[in-house]
Image: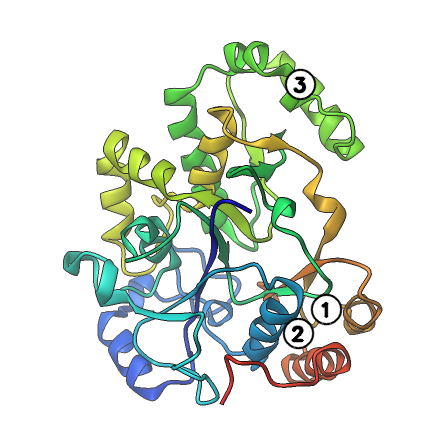
Amino acid sequence: MNYPIDIVIAWVDGNDSKWQQTKALYETPKNTISNKNTTTSVDNTIQRYRDWENLQYLFRGIEKFAPYVRTVHFVTCGHLPSWLNTKATKLHIVKHSDYIPEQYLPTFSSHPIELNFHRISQLSENFLYFNDDFFFTSITKPDDFFVNGIPRDMLALQPVVANPQNPTMSHIFLNNSLILCKHFNKRNNIKKQPNKYFKLGYPLIYFIYNLLELTFPLFTGFYTTHGPSPLCKSTLAMIWEKEFEVLNNTCNHRFRHNDDVNQYLIREWQKLSGHFIASNINKFLKYFDAGKDNKAIYQAITNQKYKMICLNDPCFDIDFETGKATIIKAFEKILPDKCSFEI
């Protein structure tokens, strides 16, 4: 491999009392969602911040299943897990204040954190963005994510879905689409790279969606696999140049907001630019709502059927403690030993 691949992990310790106090200073009744029946322009739900206490298994998985990774950039507001070995050779601890412009801080939204990644010191051009709910469960190779420095991804169209359980995300995905429509003509783009819209091996449902979308002159939305994002630092810098006002407004929101865009704008921009290798990445990644089907999650981890899984914290009530215990038990089966990132 003649180019480095880094990983960026964004993490928050929702149990940190100092962080909770700071967050409370910026909360007001109008931007706090008190229950699932309340709809506001700000997303400040408990699922955004609670800790499943399984982050160490992400680091163990990196060391065991992705040894080619050059550096892990661990991004936090300043707090760190008690078990983290801060002197680990491959670890770069990044505080928000190290790279996010001061006017956007403090932030309690993932969007300013994501949209400023290109400012991280020593970050490689090619990097994988990990939420703290993505995990390696089997051996991977560099070209699962990049081929000769070009991201491997899937270009799949899908209308933006109005989701009353998580309305803020519906707004954000629509905002992303509006920006992309501004810079890319849908029908010209399909003519320019038809083999990337209709790639043999894509999941049948998205092959069909792409065919149906030929009917509409403008983009109605995009499907992006909820897993590690293969990103290019230069793409993010370019979007800041072309859409400064939109990104600046997003970064000025302390909490997730209906007017935001998010990191999927970067990923889709890469695809529409043709800067990606078309591939069905769903083959090695499985998505779960954590705590909803504990038996299926346990089997997926312990059987190591997939190279990676996503354990998303759902926006509905679950038995949190039972789900957390099941997930930890499963990871202990395949990753029982401490790694160099742990004390």
Q: Which residue is mark 1?
A: 292
Q: What label does residue 207 carry, if any?
A: none
Q: Is residue 19 left or right of residue 191?
A: left
* Disc 3, SS: helix
Q: Which residue is mark 3?
A: 195
Residue 85 vs residue 37, the one in the foreground: 85
Alpha carbon of mark 2 to alpha carbon of mark 1: how far? 6 Å
Q: Position of residue 274 (x, y in %)?
A: 51, 24
Q: Is residue 159 visible?
A: no
Q: Position of residue 108 (x, y in %)?
A: 33, 65
Q: Residue visible at 48% across and 48% down? A: 169
Q: Residue visible at 35% across and 45% down? A: 260
Q: Please tell me how crowded label 2 is: few (under 14), some (14-19), or many (20+) other residues with Cα within 10 Å.
A: some
* Disc 1, SS: loop
Q: Is residue 64 left or right of residue 32?
A: right
Mark sitting earlier along the chain (1/3): 3
Q: Position of residue 265 (x, y in %)?
A: 43, 38
